[in-house]
Amino acid sequence: MASLALSRHLIPFALFLLTLTIPATAQTYAQTYANLSRGTSLTPLGRATSWPSPSGDFAFGFRRLDSNASLFILAIWFNSTSPQTIVWFANGDTPVQAGSKLELTSDGQLSLTDQTGNEIWNPGVSNASYAALLDTGNLILSSPSFSSPLWQSFSLPADTLLPGQVLTPGLSLFSRFMDSNFSTGRFALAAQTDGNLVLYPVAPLPSRNFYDAYWATDTMGSGSNSRLVFSTSGDLYYALTNGTQINITSNGTYSTEDFYQRATLDVDGVFTVYVYPKKESEKAIWGDKWTAVDVIPSDICTRVLTDVGSGACGFNSFCVLDENKRPDCRCPSSYLFMDSAMKFKGCKPDFELQSCELDESDSFKLETVSGVDWPKADYEHYTQVDEENCRSFCLSDCLCAVAVYRNGECWKKKLPLSNGRTGNVGGKLLIKVPKYNASFPPPPGTVGAMERNDRSTLILVESLLLGSSGLLNLILITAIFAMVYCCHSRSLMKHNQDTTMLGLNLRIFTYKELEEATKGFSEELGSGSFGAVYKGLLLASDARTSIAVKQLHKTLHEDSEKEFTNEVRSIGQTHHKNLVRLFGFCNEGTHRILVYEYMCNGSLTSFLFGSERPSWIKRVQVATGIARGLAYLHDECSTQIIHCDIKPQNILLDENFVARISDFGLAKLLRTDQSRTSTGIRGTRGYVAPEWFRNTAITAKVDVYSFGVMLLEIICCRKNLEAEAGDEDRAVLVYWAYDCYREGNLELLAGNDEEAMADMGMFETLVMVAIWCIQEEPSLRPSMKKVNQMLEGAVMVSVPPDPSSHITPIR
Ligand SMILES: *[C@@H]1O[C@H](CO)[C@@H](O)[C@H](O)[C@H]1NC(C)=O
Ligand SMILES: *[C@@H]1O[C@H](CO)[C@@H](O)[C@H](O)[C@H]1NC(C)=O
Ligand SMILES: *[C@@H]1O[C@H](CO)[C@@H](O)[C@H](O)[C@H]1NC(C)=O
Ligand SMILES: *[C@@H]1O[C@H](CO)[C@@H](O)[C@H](O)[C@H]1NC(C)=O
Ligand SMILES: *[C@@H]1O[C@H](CO)[C@@H](O)[C@H](O)[C@H]1NC(C)=O
Ligand SMILES: *[C@@H]1O[C@H](CO)[C@@H](O)[C@H](O)[C@H]1NC(C)=O
Ligand SMILES: *[C@@H]1O[C@H](CO)[C@@H](O)[C@H](O)[C@H]1NC(C)=O
Ligand SMILES: *[C@@H]1O[C@H](CO)[C@@H](O)[C@H](O)[C@H]1NC(C)=O
Ligand SMILES: *[C@@H]1O[C@H](CO)[C@@H](O)[C@H](O)[C@H]1NC(C)=O
Ligand SMILES: *[C@@H]1O[C@H](CO)[C@@H](O)[C@H](O)[C@H]1NC(C)=O
């Protein structure tokens, strides 16, 4: 919307130059029209919430938003169409709540205040003696001593022009953000003071600067008085200063006697003329609805082409013109909408991008896409190459997302792809996608050199880890170093260096306080590689809180104090119902102590492998809870946290038997203490993802693997490794489970668990999900987010391949 100063400035124009389009004088308004006198007001919920024009065609007042029933905008709308259609609004970017008020004050100002009394909007004139809504849909503020309005809504347009309304130089229409969200949207129609009428894509709030035009009358220099006129007879034309008229519509005009009409800059950037029949006889032909009779431009998809900005649709998507000449935004294959309710927001890759550290060119392929182009995303251009060169240039370049090959020339394009449209590149457009995904696993034996029969080797490796062969220890240390390094570098990359604890609900404890709370560290709950955990009790005047006090080994480097605080800070920022809450910490001298809430129902180990088998339903709940907590750690907290040590001992249960992940973030904290952590790894043999033993990057997929192993333990209520199982086939649960699954013998796996067998559908789903998670090839494992979707039934679980069939060889 134009600034208030501007609109005030323009009033003389609108009134005196264009009196032909506004057919009455102020004198007649006062006599003819219903009006709002000084001191009257409207409220969103009161008796008077809106106010009609004399004919009842229009109404003015508060409208409740469809997108949020507690928010209102001040608007003018067609009151007798179905649905009622908003044509003007004052506060699209700042909707108000119940308790707000519109008043024509005693000094003649129109003022919208919010529920707290702050003024939200005011057209900037005073001394108005009354306000009136005319039958044209124009709201005026008038004074009897003047023959013209002091202010009118027609001079402050929103996204719509009505017959009788003129867009004068300096004014713009802005599209809304969405049909039910009146915030400033992505497009503008500007009547420029240079004489040009132009459609622009608009940068997001708060800037709203214009990108490159996608339509214009090209009448620059036609004089500073050129203006867009929607005449009372229904003609839409651009009137140049010298009197020449340029028709904007090309599809005929409709009588304003017979049709309600409006020209709206729609959410999708198409400036559209709509008509709605007034008479029953016309309704029989046109239907009781708005019909688009003209669209500008006729093909927005190819018209929008900007150096900056995404184009007609969002980034990484492409625009297809539908049969109504509307843009339809679509994602390329292997890409997903950012938000399927707002397709214009663009798409994101539904796969992990090619790593720039590792050679992953074998894991990706180029798919030919026809009829689509992203003309603006080029970053490299080669000549005198063949298609094979072009393909390998792109495949071996982690930045390359799309390649175009044409007659010996090759272009590389990068993300985000912009200005996507249907079009012909005149050659081949190739988009990079992963070779394999969850629905298309690689055919057996095609990827790695290590085949299924190498499983015995892995068993050997694992069992040898129990002993202490020198060579294996070397491998182990390397693996641990890789883990520690990976978690470390992630933390350094994403760290906020600010060490203040302000704003976090973390308490800093003194050592003495904790000594007292734990009665001198007397009741040990357990111990691990990191140190020991003690039970404690905090006494406040009104409450007693049980705590778990985790004393980390004192062998941390002396100078790590600041890093410790940083790490603790990032742990303290996590809040999720499936995570153990960190209350505070102590960082005093050599003491490094973490204080957690106390979990009264022990760990998953005692829950699962205790004397009585817990109920099936509880186990399923525990499994889904853990999955949610892990997804949060991986994707939702500000710094990604890879647990690196998921195992039943690290899953605790609260008083409602809700699963709570503990010890997350410790992998980073303990990085300086490698020998200790190695004990940790040895202790968690069986949960460790195979890539620890390879020279490949450690990603969040290591947790997915450990989760998969644990999921099998939860559903089968047995440990992964049972040396005393007697039967060799059954000794390792992860292998036995896949064997049972492959042979269709899940009853065998369920054992005598009648509850689980009664819920065989769920049992099978969980087994399949677990097998996906324990794929030895990390890229085949789903993300935890995907695991959640599978567990919730939001996505189908496809048939998992043999976990050990596709592993890249040890490098
Ligand atoms: C509108 O307001 C004017 C000025 O206050 C008053 O003279 C007139 O009677 C009002 N008209 C109606 C219909 O209320
Ligand atoms: C708008 O129309 C509805 C009927 O569709 C009517 O009940 C209401 O009073 C009208 N509003 C105004 C302000 O005239
Ligand atoms: C609706 O708006 C109110 C006030 O801005 C906000 O508190 C509430 O969360 C919103 N509700 C939804 C569903 O967005
Ligand atoms: C409003 O009217 C009063 C009295 O008629 C006058 O003194 C004052 O200057 C006017 N204010 C404006 C802003 O026109
Ligand atoms: C409208 O969309 C904007 C931009 O995304 C958002 O900030 C605002 O909260 C939305 N308003 C409502 C009422 O949903
Ligand atoms: C009016 O101005 C336009 C553009 O400036 C020009 O093309 C046109 O010939 C002019 N018409 C007359 C009648 O002068
Ligand atoms: C513009 O529209 C008017 C009214 O529909 C029509 O009479 C006139 O011929 C049109 N002019 C051009 C150049 O198409
Ligand atoms: C012209 O108007 C008719 C309705 O009269 C409509 O069906 C048609 O789609 C319109 N053509 C264009 C180009 O908008
Ligand atoms: C998986 O890959 C196939 C073949 O490349 C593709 O058609 C399919 O859309 C992909 N599925 C997902 C979920 O990405
Ligand atoms: C679980 O916690 C509740 C509440 O503290 C307690 O009553 C119950 O005995 C606990 N159960 C087990 C198995 O520890």
Image (cartoon, helix red, strand yellow):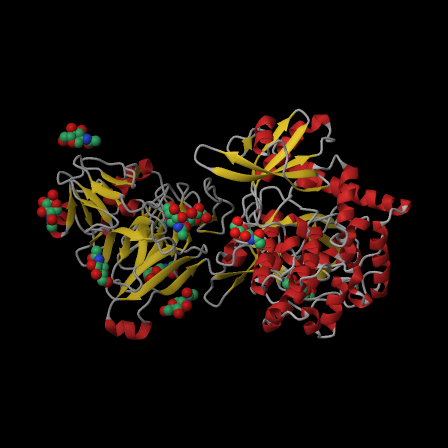
Would you place residue 592 above or below residue 482 in this image?
A: above
- Residue 518 on image: x %, y %: 59, 34
Where is residue 59, by image quadrant?
Answer: bottom left
Question: In the shown orientation, is residue 262 left or right of residue 136?
Answer: right
Q: Residue at x 39, y 41 (%)?
A: 193
**How many marks are shown on the rendered structure?**
0
Q: Is residue 572 above or below residue 348?
A: above
Q: Quadrant of residue 801?
A: bottom right
User: Furthest residue to the right?
Assistant: 470
Image spot of residue 531 (x, y percent): 70, 37
Relative to the observer, which residue lies in front, 745 or 755? 755
Q: Give percent across and percent down for residue 771.
A: 70, 63
Query: In the image, is 675 to the left or to the right of 149?
Result: right
Q: Is residue 498 visible?
A: no
Is residue 399 something one can see in this rendering?
Answer: yes
Q: Is residue 504 left or right of residue 475?
A: left
Quadrant occupied by the N terminus: top left
Viewer-side residue, 105 vs 203? 105
Question: Above or below — where is 687 with respect to 529?
Answer: below
Q: Is residue 363 left or right of residue 324?
A: right
Ligand 8 found in image quarter: bottom left
800 and 3: which one is in front?
Answer: 800
For residue 231, above or below residue 128: below
Q: Residue at x 74, y 74 (%)?
A: 743
Relative image position of residue 305 (x, y in whole percent): 55, 51
